[in-house]
C-alpha cells in the first residue's frame, strides 16, 4: 500500500481548500499555498540540490582540515620532510616577490594609460577650441558682407 502526503503539489481538493483558507486568514498564506501548488514539485528538487551542495561543501571542508587547514599562505601543514618544506617556503616566497613585481608593473601601466587618456582629451579639447574659433571667424566674416 502506498501512502501519499495529504498536502502535495498540484490542484487537489485538500490543497485547494488550504489555499482558500490561507487567502481568508491572510493573503500571503494563500499566495504561498498557490505557489506551492504550482511549483512544489520543482521546490523539492531545488531543496535537494541545496542539501547536496551543503554536503559537498562540508566534505570539502573536512578534506581541507585533513590537509593542514587550507591552502592559503602560511596555512600549510608540514609534510614531515624538512627539505621539501624549505623548498616549498622558498618557492612561495619567490612567487610572492613575482606577484609584487607584477602588481607594480600593473600600477605603472595604469598610470601610463591615464596619462595617454589625459593627452588625448587635451588634444580633442584643443581641436574643439580651434574649430570653434575658426567657425566664429568665418561667421564674423560672413556677417560683414
Image: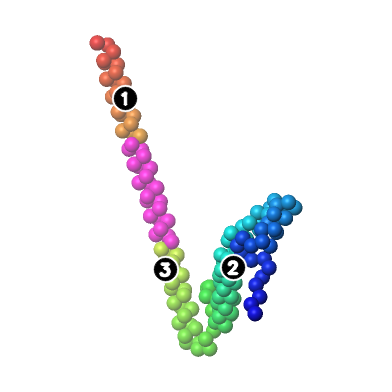
Q: Are marks 2 and 3 in contact (CB under 8 Å)?
A: no
**Crowd band around label 3 with a 10 angstrom C-alpha radius: few (<14), some (14–19), many (20+):** few
Instruction: Report the residue that reaches farthest toward the right.
Output: 25
Lateral position of residue 27 relative to residue 109, left or right? right
Label 3 element class: helix
Q: Residue at x 57, y 83 (%)?
A: 66
**Residue closest to the eye, 134 or 97:** 134
Front one among 15 and 117: 15
Report the span colored magenta: 103-124
**Residue 132 within the segment the image draws in magenta:** no
Q: Nearer the viewer, mark 3 or mark 1?
A: 1
Q: Could you tell me residue 39's position as x and y percent?
A: 58, 61
What residue appears at the point 42 percent right and 60 percent down from the top-left corner? 104
Pointer 1 local density, CA inside 10 Å: few below 14, some 14–19, many at least 20: few
**Residues at marks 2 and 1, CA–CA distance in whole angstroms:** 72 Å
Residue at disc 1, secondary structure:
helix
- Structural distance between the alpha carbons of marks 2 and 3: 49 Å
Residue at which label 1 appears = 133
Check if residue 110 falls in the magenta segment: yes
* Residue 67: percent from left, percent from top: 54, 82
Q: Would you name the residue on which mark 2 appears?
A: 44
Q: Which mark is first along the chain, 3 or 2?
A: 2
Q: Quadrant of residue 133?
A: top left
- The reply, left or right, for residue 23 in relation to residue 111 is right
List x then y, in percent, for residue 12: 64, 62
Q: Earlier in the sequence, mark 3 or mark 1?
A: 3
Question: Mark 3 sits on what residue?
Answer: 98
Q: How is the image coloured?
A: rainbow
Image disc number at residue 46? none
Foreground tag (2 vs 3): 2
Amino acid at each position: 500500500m502506498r501512502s501519499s502526503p495529504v498536502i502535495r503539489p498540484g490542484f487537489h481538493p485538500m490543497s485547494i481548500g488550504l489555499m482558500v483558507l490561507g487567502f481568508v486568514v491572510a493573503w500571503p498564506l494563500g499566495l504561498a499555498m498557490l505557489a506551492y501548488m504550482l511549483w512544489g514539485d520543482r521546490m523539492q528538487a531545488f531543496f535537494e540540490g541545496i542539501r547536496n551542495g551543503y554536503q559537498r561543501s562540508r566534505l570539502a571542508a573536512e578534506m581541507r582540515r585533513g590537509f593542514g587547514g587550507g591552502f592559503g599562505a602560511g596555512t600549510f601543514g608540514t609534510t614531515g620532510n624538512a627539505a621539501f618544506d624549505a623548498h616549498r617556503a622558498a618557492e612561495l616566497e619567490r612567487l610572492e616577490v613575482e606577484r609584487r613585481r607584477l602588481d607594480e608593473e600593473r600600477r605603472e601601466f595604469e598610470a601610463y594609460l591615464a596619462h595617454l587618456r589625459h593627452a588625448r582629451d587635451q588634444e580633442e579639447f584643443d581641436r574643439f577650441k580651434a574649430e570653434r574659433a575658426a567657425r566664429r571667424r568665418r561667421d564674423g566674416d560672413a556677417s560683414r558682407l
